[in-house]
Image: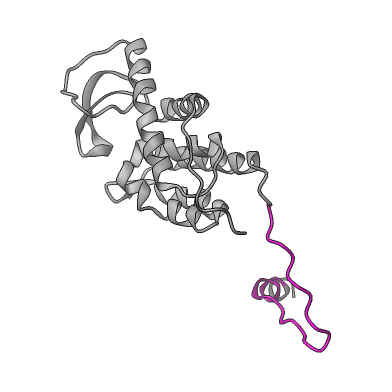
Amino acid sequence: MALKTSHKVGVTAGAVVLCCSMVMPYEGLWLTAKPDKLAYNIPTVCYGETEGVKVGDTYTKAQCVEKLQKKMPRYLRSAAACITVPVSERTLAAYGSLTYNIGEKAFCHSTVVKKLNAGDPFGSCDAMLAWSHAGGKFVQGLYDRRVKERADCLRGIKDLKLPTAAPAAPELPKTVVAPTPWYVRVWNWLMS
């Protein structure tokens, strides 16, 4: 399926709210800055905030929510700048959550973006699951987050009402017999 490639993705208030609701439960809330062991001991506070943070800085929950709400449009705009195809608010929010967690450059150079811009939105959502490691090790919490982001990404694709299946293959001439697909041969072998 070919999607148009000159689409400018806009960041809406709805995408910001959705993205913040995705980020908050997985980043966790730290009211006092401390080194984040999953992020090479970078001082971190609130909902994953690292910029300008010193160990021991303190904030209220309301200040942390405000910081995230002010910062999230930046990550959504960064994600949107890499996307050349139409996406829904929900899908953009899922990409924004991923971008906030892995960084803007990593997102823009990821397989997630490459698949999306190549016209494979479903493969793009699936590619999010690969970002479940920190320090070279699998992290269950990151995987759980990716599963949620992937689900929102896929739900957003449905919001755009894109076809959920590839178009039917053209009918072969009657003199040509189509080979049995490999997965059918494997299934038949397993069932015999």
Figure check: 114 above or below 142: below
Percent x, y of residue 137 = 32, 49
**In the displayed image of the protein, which residue is found farthest to the bottom?**
175
What is the chief secondary structure element of the magenta stretch? Answer: loop
Q: Is residue 27 visible?
A: no
Percent x, y of residue 66 = 36, 16
Q: Quadrant of the C terminus?
A: bottom right
Residue found at x 52% / y 43%:
150
Q: Is residue 175 magenta?
A: yes
**In the displayed image of the protein, which residue is found farthest to the right?**
174
Figure check: 18 above or below 179: above
Residue found at x 45% / y 37%:
145
Q: Quadrant of the N terminus?
A: bottom right
Q: How is the image coloured?
A: one colour
Range of residues picked out in magenta:
164-187
Q: Quadrant of residue 67?
A: top left
Percent x, y of residue 48 = 31, 28
Q: In the image shown, does 10 or 99 lie closer to the viewer?
A: 10
Q: Is residue 136 visible?
A: yes
Tell how many labels: 0
**In the displayed image of the protein, which residue is found farthest to the front?**
6
Q: Is residue 56 magenta?
A: no
Q: In the image shown, does 68 or 128 lie closer to the viewer?
A: 68
Figure check: 152 above or below 164: above
Horizontal side of 42 relative to 14 (left or right) equals left
Percent x, y of residue 54 = 15, 23
Q: Quadrant of residue 184?
A: bottom right
Residue found at x 42% / y 29%:
23
